Image (cartoon, rainbow, N blue to C red):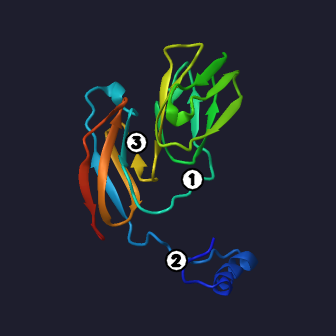
Amino acid sequence: MLLAGKSFQSILLLVLPWLLFGVPPILPITAANAETIKGTVRYKLEEDVGKTVVYIEKASGTFMPPYKHPIMDQIELTFVPYVLPVLIGTTVDFHNSDDILNNIFTPSWAGHKFNLGTYPKGVIRSFTFDRLGEVALLCNIHPDMEGYILVLQNPYFAVPDKDGKYQIPNVPPGVYNLKRWYKRSISPVKDITVEKGK
């Protein structure tokens, strides 16, 4: 990775001690002034837990998808988690932990209308999400199964916990549109300002 304003030699001098002695280099952090957005979502029903995503609609910058693939599992004929927010470009691994065959497909444009086929327990199928939007997950064999992948422009998102509390870390100072996704509906935009030290 090349860092702005740093020559290759200076970067090598930073990394060399780590390579020789196992000492991690101290590299400049681009989000040094980043802050954490905190809030609470109020659930109407206990069953609403895990069915909400709070996210920043758009943020400037280039974001790399995670190296480790997030997992969408199938447990007792249920997609787990119910909704999985991911950064665009992320590859998701689809597990089947049920003792019976399951099939995952989507009619959604954002998921290229994929069909991962029918597969047994222990098999993993993967898909890379390169379009923004909501991807509904369904099963051809079990019509009651339903889950979602929410493909977002940036990594500033969170799924509130059982008490409705959420944190979105590492957000640079700026003015943003904060939104809430809940079971296919999106809340009106809430304008927020992230300030350094606040």
Which quadrant is the C terminus positioned in? bottom left
Which is more foreground, mark 1 or mark 2?
A: 1
Q: Residues within 10 Å of mark 1 (few under 14, many from 20)?
A: some
At mark 2, the secondary structure is loop
Q: In the rendering, at what x and y percent does residue 14 appear? A: 64, 82
Tell me the residue that label 3 is attached to: 159
Q: In the rendering, at what x and y percent does residue 115 appear? A: 63, 25
Tell me the residue that label 1 is attached to: 65
The answer to whether 194 appears left or right of 59 in the picture is left
Q: Check disc 2 and give the amino acid type.
A: Pro
Please say if 163 is above or below 191: above
Q: Residues within 10 Å of mark 3 (few under 14, many from 20)?
A: many
The answer to whether 87 appears left or right of 39 in the picture is right
- Among the two numbered marks 2 and 3 on one chain, the one whose residue lies closer to the N terminus: 2
Residue drawn at (67%, 83%) of the image: 8
Tell me the residue that label 2 is attached to: 28
Q: Check disc 1 and give the amino acid type.
A: Pro
